[in-house]
Image (tube, rainbow, N blue to C red):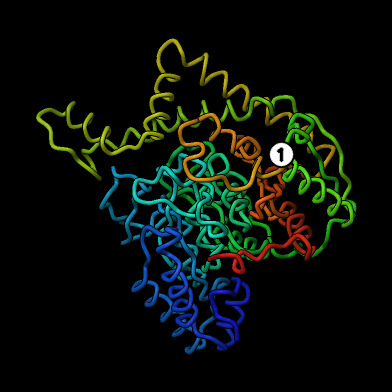
Amino acid sequence: MTQPWRWGAEAIVRRVRSGEVSALEVFESCLTRSRELEPNLGAYLDLAADDGRQRALAVDRKRRGGERLGELAGVPVAIKDNISVAGRPLTCASRILRGFVAVESATVVERLEAADAVIFGKCNLDEFGMGSSCESSAYQRTHNPWLHDRVPGGSSGGSAAAVASGVPVALGSDTGGSIRQPAAFCGVVGIKPTYGLVSRYGLVAFASSTDHIGPLTRSVRDGALTLGAIAGADPRDATCSHRPVADLMAGLEEGIEGIRLGVAEELEIDRLPADVYDAWQRSLAALEDLGAEIHSVSAPTLKAATACYYVLCCCEASTNLARFDGVRYGQRVPAETVDELLRASRSQGFGDEVKRRIMLGTFALSAGHYDDFYGRAESVRQALRRELEQAFERVDALLAPTAPSGAFGFDERTEDPIAMVLSDVYTTPASLTGMPAISVPNGRDAQGLPLGLQIIGPAFEDATVLRIGRAFEHQSAWRIDPLEEAA
């Protein structure tokens, strides 16, 4: 029998329910694997070994007692460390929250536990989710499991690396691409659901209007299973939709014969590097072989999407991060006056990228600049949403690369914020508009590192996006097994 750490979520649930393996055995297998790799990987800020064992034992007791097990029975799930887990550290990879312990769990964590999942640990990230490489963490760098001198992507780099190396499921957050881009870099599946499908309660806010929580898994089926478990209305999150959640597993295997897929002219995909463009062209051909129709569409505002996103996210970050002041919780630097305390605590507590975004956002929101920056960016967002909705009148989903390259090296882009920003050029549109999107592996770059294909759908058509992703994934020639590559 293969080691349990190699199994996906569906396989674990089936075997735990049947009694073929215990939840504790699964947990211990994943824990042993993760501890072996962690010195060279740096995916975790906290491993919940004792709590996880107790949770796994509780699942096993339920099975022995004949109780009905949940849809994620015995599945270890790693959690990005900007999502609250009661009794565990919550640092957001920032010095300003060093030593802070969450007093309650996020809604998504409560729902995972209600589904009999086992919380595995807290994953590293770019500080407060601000970054595209997992290099801005105050505590450690996470390395790409495929090649350790490359970044895993960001900001959910720890979550992606964890799934690519030994845990079947992780949760990440996606504000401008922070689930999808690291999923592409690490050769796993990353899902950003429709805004409002999944509660954000218990997620430390970065940019509230574009923050999403979603799963990273090794297959679309596992992603759909996990998303179904965490989705649904939540009275504690006023932005959470009250729509009934569709059965996301029901139509996954129906195929895509006759489905219409759009490619926006404004993406200028023909300007991609040759290896990425080749993978893109082969992906389109594969989708056509599956019966899909590829159409050209236009959304002129796409060209302004990334600039618009960075104005809005910096403005919202400036507001949301004002609470981290050294007074209420987290790091406090002693000082003689309150002003000095605030200045010293925030100066020492925040890293350079967070400071940069706070200052940019504060400037954009200041008197005399609000309309020029925030107001105009919000207008661009609304125009982009209208254009994409018009495009969806012609097609069922849109296609794009997930990122313009494979994983890049450490320190290549840290001194050039614009180059780092351009890592998100294909992912920001779905974040701005709240539309569902998935990244699935679609080949490798010239260095043999994974690339991703992104599928974007209309709001609340998450099931359609998943079905297209599953059909593409099902083509064996396009699958990548990161577990065979992780060192």
Q: Is residue 392 visible?
A: yes
Q: Which residue is drawn at 76% across and 62% down?
A: 251
Where does residue 409 sit, x and y in percent of width and height?
53, 45
Comparing 362 with 38, the one in front is 38
Q: From what the image shows, is residue 33 above or below residue 256? A: below
Tell me if residue 247 can be seen. Answer: no
Q: Residue at x 57, y 24 (%)?
A: 378
- The residue most toward the left is 336
The count of marks equals 1
State the residue at coordinates (65%, 43%).
Answer: 405
Q: Nearer the viewer, residue 300 or 138?
A: 138
Residue 248: image quadrant is bottom right
Question: Which kind of residue does numbered mark 1 sit on?
Answer: Pro
Task: State left or right for residue 286 relative to residue 440.
Answer: right
10 Å crowding of disc 1: few (<14), some (14-19), many (20+): few
* 136 w.r.t. 57: above or below: above
Can you identify the residue that label 1 sits on? 273
Percent of width and height locating residue 366: 40, 16
Residue 349 coordinates in the image, percent (x, y): 28, 39
On-image quarter of the N terminus: bottom right
Residue 60, position in %: x, y? 46, 84
Q: Residue at x 61, y 80 (%)?
A: 14
For mark 1, give the secondary structure: loop
* Quadrant assignment, res 40: bottom left
Task: Find residue 472 and report its image quarter.
Answer: bottom right
**Is 25 situated left or right of 294 in this image?**
left
